[in-house]
Amino acid sequence: MVDTIKKADFTELRPGIKVPAQETILTPRFYTTDFEAVARMEVEVNAAELEALLEEFRVDYNRHHFVRDAEFDQSWEHIDGETRRLFVEFLERSCTAEFSGFLLYKELSRKLKGRNPLLAESFALMARDEARHAGFLNKAMSDFNLSLDLGFLTQTHQYTYFQPKFIFYATYLSEKIGYWRYITIFRHLEAHPEDRVYPIFKFFENWCQDENRHGDFFDAVMRAQPQFLNDWRARLWSRFFLLSVFATMYLNDIQRAGFYRAIGLDAREYDIHVISKTNETAGRVFPVVLDVEHPDFYRRLDQCVENNCRLGEIAQAEGPKVLKFFRKLPLYLSNLGHLVALYFIPPIDVRAQQTAVR
């Protein structure tokens, strides 16, 4: 019965190799950018901080960390049914996100080599970290008798073009929210070891420090480019990227609440904590952050979650595609309306607060 449940949930390219999850607006993105513009960037104004971060990358604190131990060497058939499906989804999404970072950083390093040595080496070493993470996650998937063909993923996944400024906004937030996600899970399981049902979670403490250092690197690069942070456009884009990252995580995680329940966490409480901490961290570089304490913030996100549940029910129902589209349309418009309303909640002006403290 367990085997029937497992095979019903996943389609395979070939035995043991999972077909990548269908790309949607909520799946991890693969990015490309204007590499020539990045190569021309001047970073001398913040060179000392960037050199210090590069030295940390060279030290490679986690070079011996990602080594599977004897605890992995057992059958994981007892994680079955819906819980198994959610675990595989978590590992796949995490692996895809890390591999996306690897591809972007590797290409940046290659295009910047000989043009901007400080940035080129930094991106090369961050690509090393991301490849290590992706490989470790993909190996974990094999404990559930599946893995991803990362070469196939490279060739078939769609790439989203962003200007360098937007790449830095997005990757900074991705690395910082990754830090808070990993460390929050690690601390919970450290306090409640009975909930650590799979050994990958014990690696999260050191793992999240890679994410944190990568985020610090993008922080330092952006502060070397004041035009990225100090005009009215930066204030608008900061809000857009914060909301995009928070809403995507929230909608994904609440939809997969069973995964968090399996490790003893409430998905909503977990996301509220991670969003609060990431928003606070972003205030160190962004000119404004979101007012996540506003009473409408989670009320509207919860309405989007409810809409998404109804969209899923419509998708599973029988009937003509055209009829389904018209049934879905009000829900899409409702989600759009809620997200626009969230964007226009007055943000918190970090610079003004800092000036008032002084």
Image: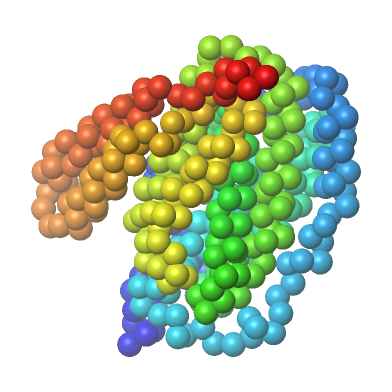
- The answer to which of 92 and 310 lies nearer the viewer is 310
Q: Quadrant of residue 230?
A: top right
Q: Position of residue 199 (x, y in %)?
A: 61, 75
Measured as percent of width and height from the top left, residue 222 is found at: 69, 26
Instruction: Classify 301 as above or below 75.
Output: above
Which residue does the image show at 60% across and 64% down from the upper left? 186
From where the camera sits, is residue 137 visible? yes
Q: Position of residue 88 (x, y in %)?
A: 47, 68
Query: With respect to residue 57, does 144 lie above or below?
Result: below
Q: Residue at x 35, y 30 (%)?
A: 342
Residue 139 in percent (x, y) is at: 62, 70
State the residue at coordinates (53%, 14%). Answer: 233
On the rendered image, what quadrant is the C terminus found in?
top right
Position of 53 relative to 273 (above/below)? above
Q: Which residue is farthest front?
A: 357
Residue 23 appearing in the image: no
Q: Indicate the quadrant containing the N terminus: top left, top right, bottom left or bottom right.
A: bottom left
Q: Is residue 312 above or below residue 159?
A: below
